[in-house]
Amino acid sequence: MKLSPRISFTVLFLLTSVMPAMGGQATQTLSSSVDQVITLLADPAYKKATTHSEMRSKVVNTIKAIFDTTELSRRALGAQWKTFSPEQQKRFIAAFGDLLQNTYLDKIESYTDEKVQYLSEQDLGGTRVEIATKVVGKGKEIPITYRLVDHNGWKVYDVVIEGVSMVQNYRSQFGQILMHESPDALIAKISAKKS
Amino acid sequence: MSMTTTRNFVLSLVLLTGALLLFNGGSSFAGTKSPATATANGQAIGTTAPAEPVEVEAEAMPARVPDPLYGWNKFWFTFNDVFYSRLMRPLAKGYKVVVPKKARTGLSNAYDNFTFPIRFVNCLLQLNFAKASKELGRFIINSTFGVGGLMDLAKSDPNLQPGNEDFGQTLGHYGMPEGFYIVWPFLGPSTLRDSFGMAGDAAANPLTWIFGPWSVHDDYNPWYWSYVIKGADVFNRLPETLEGYDAITKPAIEPYTAMKDAYIQYRRHAVEK
């Protein structure tokens, strides 16, 4: 009799502590990565010429950890993914990952003291969620929506701004290119772009 | 002068009739899919790879907007790119330096406040009375306390955030499909539906009525004034417009397709909102 209330209390405690954590886990994962990037960018060592490249690679590593480049690449090719050989797929992931990194790193580096608000987390079904955020600062507000998938940890597979999905945008571009050119030509185009 | 006016009026009537016809025969446009999508879908259905999660196929491309005017569109896309991104960019940069942000924001606020009828009428047409009353509230507050719309005071109220309904969205709300993609010189990307939208917005724009060909013209009220004001508004917003343009085209491998896709996605989202 002394045991059962303790067990039920423990069960109740576990339920109440696990349930909200499960609901907000993706947001927590995303926010910790984003906060990490912001902290690194705000660090004065980032601006200093001697430590800049080291800090930059730290930011790159954090971004790499939160973005699922393989999933992004697969979705950016859509149905064409299967027409690529495994070797081509690997090269595509590397090239596309570099392109995204360079593009968004340049954009992120212009942000200094912005605050990120996490507005909502919506379940998309099948281990996918959509997190609405708002970047507030310097008199402007930019709503950014992230879509995350849980393949051994939450990772971003799409970024949507004002209804424009990055993955879909690239998918239409790559689809257009692949109508007339080979996968190798596409990979070459992507690699040439980042320079 | 009166001959061209009548002709323009008849032309806009013809366009509107065409629009009504499209409502009924609209399904034919929606049904048109470019060959690329057909093959892509064919591949998706034909190949069954059990290792691949279903998600990627389930997120197949939404209905493609056909591009039968590709030649025209590509030409004007390149033209607009050269005009805005190369020629006007240094001017916009200089403008940004010379005119402080507060002044530029003031001008765009004033213009937005002035074009209140466009948004208000379209909220009503969509039978969205909540949105319509928000527009009205914004207009009243900003016109009075905001000194003729120069200051957007209503924005401080979370319930009175700016809206942007237009006639193209109204048409989309009532199920008119996009039609096809078209790039207009200077005006930029659009679709058949949104082009009718632009015509409708011009009809609701007070500038058209104040400075249009049907009002009295003298030395103080030339016929081209509405175009000058509209052009000034475009120039005033150019720094921000170019930022958005760069965000789409700079990271793009295929800028033309990137622009087309971003525009279509953006408009579809706007219609839904």
Image: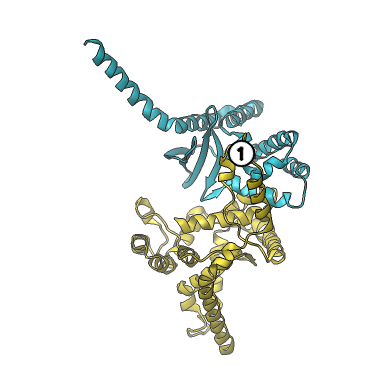
Helix, strand or loop at disc 1? helix
Residue B156 shown left or right of residue A142 in the figure: left
Residue B246 shown left or right of residue B116 in the figure: right
Q: Note whether residue B241 is visible.
A: no
- Between B176 and B258, the residue placed more toward the observer is B176
**Location of residue B186 in the rendering, given as x and y in whole percent from the top left corner:** 63, 66
- Label 1: chain? A
* Amino acid type, label 1: Leu
Q: Residue at x 51, y 72 (%)?
A: B24
The extreme top residue here reads: A2
Q: Residue at x 51, y 84 (%)?
A: B217
Quick check: A28 above or below A190? above
**Location of residue A174 in the rendering, given as x and y in whole percent from the top left corner:** 69, 48
- Between B60 and B135, the residue placed more toward the observer is B60
**Location of residue A2 in the rendering, given as x and y in whole percent from the top left corner:** 22, 10
Q: Which chain is yellow?
A: B
Q: Quadrant of residue B263?
A: bottom right
Tag 1 residue: A72
Quick check: A40 above or below B76? above
Q: Quadrant of residue B165?
A: bottom left
- Between A117 and B254, the residue placed more toward the observer is B254
Mark 1 neighbour class, 10 Å CA radius: few under 14, some 14 to 19, many 20 or more:
many
Q: Note whether residue B176 is visible.
A: yes
The extreme bottom residue here reads: B3
Quadrant of the image containing the N terminus of chain B: bottom right
Quadrant of the image containing the C terminus of chain B: bottom left
Q: Which chain is cyan?
A: A
Quick check: B158 above or below B174? above
Residue A116 shown left or right of residue A61 in the figure: left
**Location of residue A152 in the rendering, given as x and y in whole percent from the top left corner:** 54, 27
Q: Residue at x 64, y 44 (%)?
A: A78
